Image (tube, rainbow, N blue to C red):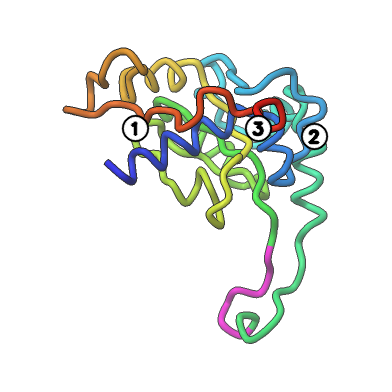
Amino acid sequence: TQKRHAVATALAASALPPLVMARGHRIGEVAELPLVVSDGVESMTKTKQAVETLKKLGCGEELQRVLDSKKVRAGKGKMRNRRYTMRRGPLVVYSEDNGIVRAMRNIPGVETACVTRLNLLKLAPGGNFGRFIIWTEGAFKKLGEIYGTLKSGAPLKKNYHLPRAEMENADLDRII
């Protein structure tokens, strides 16, 4: 359950704009976090459509940040087929793949993940949570089934309850 708690914490952090911005993502033009789009996005098959959709959602600045960050790696990694390093862009989480993986796989920095197989290394790259995540509607609804709520347990994960908040009020300046 420790790994599952870590994934739940990373998911919660991705919904807080200050943490997402602290990670370096450009989300100034994004309407709201968490960013949930319709299930029609899952059936996109063309990369051109996918880039257009991401720009409409306000991710144009984020995609440009990733493109501009491509640098030659320092050290011997260059000789070992790891020549370039690049920033991470948005993570697109879907519930069922009807072509979305193919459409998104050639966009620099953009990664895709199925909601049932969320990976902590994709949710919090480098151990820093607050990744910019774009959800499809079906995936966002499925989260409740997978992790449950604070009041009820998770239907799909036997005997699992979400971690309790350590602090009721996280505004330390006000408390002190």
Q: Nearer the viewer, residue 33 or 45?
A: 33
How far apart marks 3 and 2 lie (CA) works out to 35 Å
Rendering coords of residue 165 (x, y %): 45, 28
Q: Amino acid at mark 1?
A: Thr
Reply yes or no: does residue 114 show up in magenta: no
Quarter that holds the N terminus: top left
Residue 161 drawn above or below residue 152? below
Identify the image quadrant of residue 7: top left
Q: Nearer the viewer, residue 140 or 3?
A: 3
How far apart marks 1 and 2 lie (CA) works out to 28 Å
Q: Nearer the viewer, residue 41 or 27?
A: 27
Answer few, some or many: residues within 10 Å of disc 2's Cα (few below 14, many 20 plus, some between 14 and 19). Answer: some
Q: Which residue is mark 2?
A: 60
Q: Which residue is mark 3?
A: 172
Span colored in magenta: 79-85
Residue 63 drawn above or below residue 168? below
| Identity of the residue drawn at 23% across and 24% down | 156
Rendering coords of residue 95 (x, y %): 41, 25
Q: Earlier in the sequence, mark 3 or mark 2?
A: 2
Residue 79 drawn above or below residue 93? below
Q: Which of label 1 and label 2 is nearer to you?
A: 1
Q: Earlier in the sequence, mark 1 or mark 3?
A: 1
Q: Which residue is mark 1?
A: 116
How far apart marks 1 and 3 lie (CA) works out to 35 Å
Reply yes or no: does residue 81 show up in magenta: yes
| Identity of the residue drawn at 68% across and 69% down | 84
